[in-house]
Image (cartoon, rainbow, N blue to C red):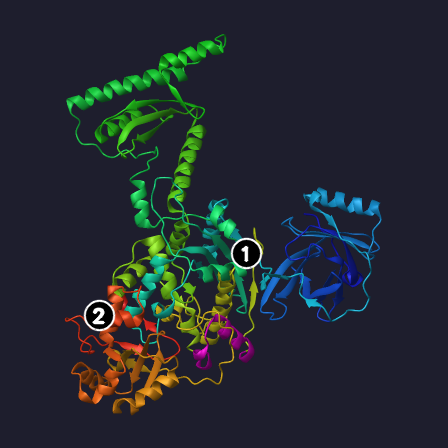
Amino acid sequence: MKVVRNLDLERYMGRWYEIACFPSRFQPKDGTNTRATYTLAADGAVKVLNETWTDGRRGHIEGTAYRADPASDEAKLKVKFYVPPFLPIFPVTGDYWVLHVDDAYQYALVGQPSLNYLWILCRQPHMDEDVYNQLVERAKEEGYDVSRLRKTAHPDPPPESEQTTGDRGVWWIKSLFGRILFSIDFYLVTRRNFAEAVQELAARLETCDYVAIAAQKTGAPTGWRHALLVDTPETAYLKARLAAESFQPLHFAICPFRIDAASPSTLVAYPYNFHLFPRDELQIGMPSYSFSCQSSYLSSMAHSGFDFNMCIYDGISYLSRVQESLAREKIFIPHVRQLSPTPSTSVADSVFMSRIKSRIEHWRKGYTKPSNTADGSLVSSLRQLILGGESYGSRPSFSIDVCSDRQVQLVLEAVNHISDDLVALVVPDKAGAARAVRVIFTSSTEDKNLLLMDIEKMEDEHNLKFRGFREVIDLLSSSQKPIISYNCLNDFTMIHSKFVGPLPPNLHEFMCSLRMVFSNVIDISHMWREIGPLRKAKNIQAALSYLQRQYFVPMDVEIPQQDSNNCITKSGENVLRITKLFAKLSYLLKISPNGQSHSGQKCHTVEEYSYIFYPSCMDEDSEDVKFANESDTTRSMRTDNVVLLWGFRETSVKELRSRLASLHHTFSKDFELKLLDNSCSALIFRSSDMAMELLREINSESPSLNNFFSEGLKAAGFEVYRKVCRLGLWDSDLAEALDGVSSEPSTSTLSGYGTSEIYWNTSLMLDLKEYLEC
């Protein structure tokens, strides 16, 4: 693309009015009086102020422009804006190429190498029509689709002064159903462009060091079914398995990224938005999909702008590895089979092979023998009919029926001996057994190579249909890149359930299976808890906001332009936050991909943080970031310190604690109380002896607990809760489930065996490395 050379930046400075442009998502459709003001800074950079008016209200955003290559004389600039403007943490960089400017610097044509954006600018709000047409022709010469140009109205020239009131950043953010969505180039992927996106993603993975992922599902566990403060790794896994088997993923955000080795403060990211929807893509009656949807969860997704129409009609289907194996038993396509070594041939084999060779040679001779040019098309058609051939596309072919794999091998061997211009395809029947071998004649070596490429492409497309989105999961697995996520236990049980196979019955088997698929999975919340004050952060947003305020960690996120859609889903927001947060934490914790810093100093590797998960025990949508003064009460406890209590009517911890103090002397001791749901609470005693004493007295129906029993209260040790989870009594209230299990004759209410460690805090840490000893 031809651009202006030796652009005089000083003359180019000042105010420019937008006369016409290509419509874009980040610019209001009804914006008027749109203009840009450029000011040259002392360091040679250009300060940019973009303004537009909508319904009389001014919107603006400020940025910086600089030469893409300071050593070049071409007018190729980069423009950087930080979004969202009210919390500028994501830099968005775009190209700004001056394609034409007149000698007087009164009008200009500005574009980008992608041909997706184009602006016609003028020093005045209006431009002479002849000049406008000349600039349009200039753009057309560069390959722009000028039919997309839309003129910008300038009905009432705004004040010349740079006002400070109005909506900051209208150009780069927009409100959709009350939620802010900022303009970042996400590659939107549906089944229409899935094959191309997979190829591009594979290339991105090669150049990146890490991959961040985030997902949106049709629901999430509620009540006592989500991870509680008293859960052990095993019970937390059982709950995550329930969620994975109950809900379905609708959206996956995947972001390969790398921290620039030459500039450690620069993060290069390639975010992708994958829309998914479970359907019988192969139309074979399997698998049958049945899943739960939470209306409140779906309403929240709709409120945030999630496109359910796109998801349902264009979402990518998927099969797990186990489901694919079952599907391949029902669908078979013709394929090229390699010739395998054959044992000694019998007399019958020799006779069969001789006859097949004779048939193929006779058929082939009819196509290799030069035809008489005087023969008409009728004669040629009769010759083909007599030879008994058919066609494979535009190429001659004919089929040989077979009734065993042995005969298939003999036919392949015969074809191999006759000529290199023949290609043999094995045609299976509905049961998968070979029923015929189709022999195809090619006119040249090039034609044969083209045919083999077409067959390979057809097989790849068919395989892509079988795997669907699992192709992406397999790419992530084979890349062996560390996977960075949040709330990993829930996300990766879902990934295993939908894309690998049925979830194992226990955590040990699950971790062994997961480790075979992903070598390193890092929960971002474990990393931020390595920094003292951040241990109390409730979610990604809180952790990122605190880092932004309290630590100076310069980090620019560069998102190169790609085929994109600017609408960001909740998982899209989270995946960008994860990449930004990971980069900052890596800087603070001195983590690098190869264990060495840019200066050669020894660093930590990300593997040190692998497979330590924090199931979420708090409100994911909490916006609270004021946690600096909260106490850090994390401490290790054993399950035999835990007593489950139910049968109470109180609705607050304070009321229940006051009531218990009057019922038994044990409740005057040092213990903590937490409501697990509206029917059950957990008592955590400092001493396991106190917990065991209480449970023994309850088990023996001690007279000292008459008041306790008369109030209808019941209690049991952790083992009863563990059994409830193992039995999967998820449909009941926790109190009802505990009551049913504890009343069984074989169940002891005491925590007599199998004690495990728990972490009594606002978060639950699961160090799963011990479960990787396969």
**Neighbourhood count class around disc 1 (C-alpha, 10 Å): few under 14, some 14–19, many 20 upward:** many
Q: Magenta span has 291?
A: no
Say whether residue 518 is visible.
no
Does dot 1 land on a helix, a strand or a loop? loop
Q: Which residue is mark 1?
A: 186
Q: Magenta span has 545?
A: yes
> Mark 1 and mark 2 in contact (Cβ < 8 Å)?
no
Residue 518 got which mark?
A: none
Image location (x, y in percent) of residue 458: 41, 36
Q: Which residue is mark 2?
A: 741
Q: Residue furthest front?
A: 710
Image location (x, y in percent) of residue 483: 41, 62
Please state which amino acid type lies under the numbered disc 2. Answer: Val
Q: Nearer the viewer, residue 322 or 258?
A: 322
Image location (x, y in percent) of residue 545: 53, 74
Q: Quadrant of residue 473?
A: bottom left
- Residue 646 left/right relative to 308: left
Q: Which residues are magenta?
A: 531-551
Does dot 2 land on a helix, a strand or a loop? helix
Image location (x, y in percent) of residue 614: 38, 71
Helix, strand or loop: magenta stretch: helix
Q: Nearer the viewer, residue 671 or 163?
A: 671
Please state which amino acid type lies under the numbered disc 1. Answer: Phe
Q: Nearer the viewer, residue 58 or 143?
A: 58
- Residue 95 left/right relative to 430: right
Mark earlier in primary sequence (2, 1): 1
Tell me if residue 71 comes above or below residue 342 in the rendering: below
